[in-house]
């Protein structure tokens, strides 16, 4: 199958040609309407022998041209970056336009795929551009029978434009540089899903709240351990994720895709992991349980989430293609198994939380059986433009048997209440966060007295180091039942809603990633006083 034509074209000339077509011919470009051949429409890597990555203006021009070729492609925006750049969203499906109303009216299952949350990890952006071009040429039309696909190829658009030859210096290309990890505020957008301090994250949550994608795919590049996989992946890692979602991803979806890609291209994919750095027991260790990370956050929303991490020491071209194959197979499975996926989600949403013990603190857990990990090696090469060294994978492949630490387990739990009562004094702050996350709640119109469970604060500790511009806080204390004067304007937040697991994680006083951790309730945290959010006694 012909996928692209490599030729060297100056980026300024390419951008001028694309913009000329959009401006002169408008959204219906005459020269392309008579043909589905878009071989002239190249990404920056394709036209530069994979030495460059696509810049923001080029991305926007590319998307305008591609979306004009098919009535099934619709280009819109879903928010703005810190620097005011519009964040593009391409909607593919049997829909009239890109609006939430049209997507919902279609009756098809929405899936959201994003690239470039870390703008030095650019293979996802390039893979999505190539996929959008394929869709514009008429490929994969069968997906529209059951899916609406929402694609955001350049989420961290500001970081994308801060190209530097010394960003991610050990990564194997693009040799002409790539963007930076944080956004323009200096925030890591893949740590911002709970505290939501960036305009980008606020915009992303609006996508989740309105389009309500049933599956979310997040595309990255990984480095570190010298393994032999082209892509490593992960389902949600927080143990509070509904078991039906975790089971379906681990037992069905991810293993089936691994086998399909092995048969298709002969490449190996496996669960994300690394060997310990310098010290620690040998093993294959996954990353983190906290919902500040995209895939863990989505899991707490009772939705499917898949993390993709292309191997950074593979060539830039291979990383792009490995990511593209992965996304294609995710969408193939989703299209074929739409009913099964929706049934799993419905089952997860129907699980009552009240009275259930859920985790607030966690530790890695070791799988019962050791696994064979495919290991590799690299050679050191020199970037001809920067003079710095980088790694390129060798063809060496060998197996190493080791324990796998691929999940987490609670070290501390709390009982999920039927509902929380947020004191009137904290209602404005907490309510704003609940609104941002799409949580349903109500306000108390008349003061009364209720028997509730209160968390009485003994002490607090604050991190000695700032993280993401915040000093994280930990709360200590004990719970007991008491009669509480509930003032008018207090909030009732039920856990009997699709976002009930997220509600628990945001509001619990001992949560390792909730509002307390992110120092958003400091005003109310005094030793000897009650935490300003009470729990119902059921």
Image (tube, rainbow, N blue to C red):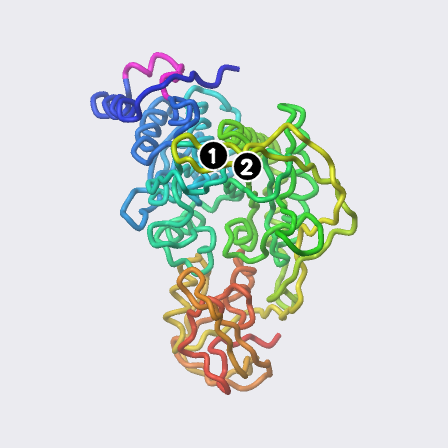
- Image coords of residue 158 (percent x, y): 33, 44
Check whether the beta carbons of the residues at disc 1 and disc 2 lie within 8 A of each other. Answer: yes
Q: Which residues are magenta?
A: 30-41
Q: Which residue is nearer to you in this view: 204 or 185?
A: 185
Circle 2 packing at 10 Å, graded few (<14), some (14-19), many (20+), is: many
- Image coords of residue 391 (percent x, y): 53, 35
Picture disc at residue 99: none
Is residue 32 on the magenta stretch? yes
Q: Which residue is mark 1?
A: 123
Is residue 130 on the magenta stretch? no
Position of 400 relative to 367 (above/below): above
Q: Which residue is mark 2?
A: 310
Position of 452 relative to 101 (above/below): below
- Image coords of residue 174 (percent x, y): 43, 32
Residue drawn at point x = 40 percent, y = 60 percent: 435
Q: Quadrant of residue 250?
A: top right
């Amino acid at each position: 199958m012909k996928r692209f034509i490599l030729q060297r074209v100056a980026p300024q000339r390419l951008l001028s040609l694309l913009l000329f077509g959009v401006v002169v011919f408008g959204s219906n470009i005459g020269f392309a309407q008579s043909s589905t051949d878009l071989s002239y429409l190249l990404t920056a890597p394709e036209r530069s022998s994979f030495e460059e990555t696509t810049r923001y203006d080029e991305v926007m021009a590319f998307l305008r041209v591609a979306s004009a070729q098919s009535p099934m492609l619709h280009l819109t925006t879903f928010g703005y970056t810190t620097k005011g750049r519009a964040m593009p969203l391409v909607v593919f499906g049997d829909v009239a336009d890109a609006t939430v109303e049209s997507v919902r009216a279609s009756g098809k299952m929405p899936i959201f795929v994003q690239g470039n949350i870390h703008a030095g990890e650019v293979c996802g952006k390039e893979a999505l551009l190539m996929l959008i071009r394929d869709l514009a040429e008429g490929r994969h039309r069968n997906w529209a029978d059951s899916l609406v696909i929402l694609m955001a190829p350049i989420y961290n658009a500001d970081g994308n434009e801060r190209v530097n030859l010394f960003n991610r210096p050990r990564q194997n290309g693009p040799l002409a540089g790539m963007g930076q990890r944080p956004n323009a505020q200096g925030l890591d957008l893949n740590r911002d899903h709970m505290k939501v301090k960036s305009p980008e994250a606020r915009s992303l949550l609006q996508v989740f709240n309105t389009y309500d994608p049933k599956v979310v795919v997040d595309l990255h590049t990984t480095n570190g351990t010298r393994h032999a996989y082209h892509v490593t992946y992960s389902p949600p890692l927080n143990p509070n994720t509904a078991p039906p979602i975790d089971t379906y991803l681990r037992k069905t979806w991810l293993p089936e895709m691994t086998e399909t890609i092995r048969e298709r291209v002969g490449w190996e994919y496996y669960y994300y992991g690394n060997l310990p750095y310098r010290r620690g027991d040998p093993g294959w260790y996954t990353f983190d349980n906290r919902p500040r990370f995209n895939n863990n956050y989505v899991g707490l929303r009772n939705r499917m989430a898949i993390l993709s991490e292309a191997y950074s020491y593979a060539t830039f071209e291979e990383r792009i293609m490995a990511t593209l194959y992965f996304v294609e197979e995710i969408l193939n499975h989703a299209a074929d198994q739409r009913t099964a996926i929706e049934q799993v989600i419905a089952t997860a949403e129907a699980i009552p939380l009240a009275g259930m013990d859920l985790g607030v603190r966690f530790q890695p857990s070791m799988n019962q059986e050791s696994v064979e990990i495919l290991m590799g090696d690299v050679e050191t090469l020199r970037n001809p433009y920067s003079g710095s060294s980088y790694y390129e994978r060798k063809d060496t492949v060998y197996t190493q048997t080791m324990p796998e630490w691929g999940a987490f387990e609670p070290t501390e739990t709390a009982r999920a209440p039927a509902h929380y009562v947020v004191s009137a004094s904290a209602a404005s702050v907490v309510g704003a966060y609940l609104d941002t996350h799409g949580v349903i709640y109500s306000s108390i119109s008349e003061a009364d007295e209720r028997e509730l469970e209160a968390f009485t604060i003994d002490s607090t500790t604050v991190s000695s180091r700032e993280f993401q511009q915040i000093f994280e806080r930990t709360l200590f204390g004990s719970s007991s039942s008491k009669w509480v004067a509930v003032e008018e304007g207090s909030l009732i937040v039920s856990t009997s809603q699709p976002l009930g697991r997220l509600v628990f994680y945001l509001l619990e006083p001992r949560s390792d990633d909730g509002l307390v951790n992110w120092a958003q309730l400091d005003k109310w945290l005094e030793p000897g006083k009650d935490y300003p959010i009470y729990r119902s006694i059921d």
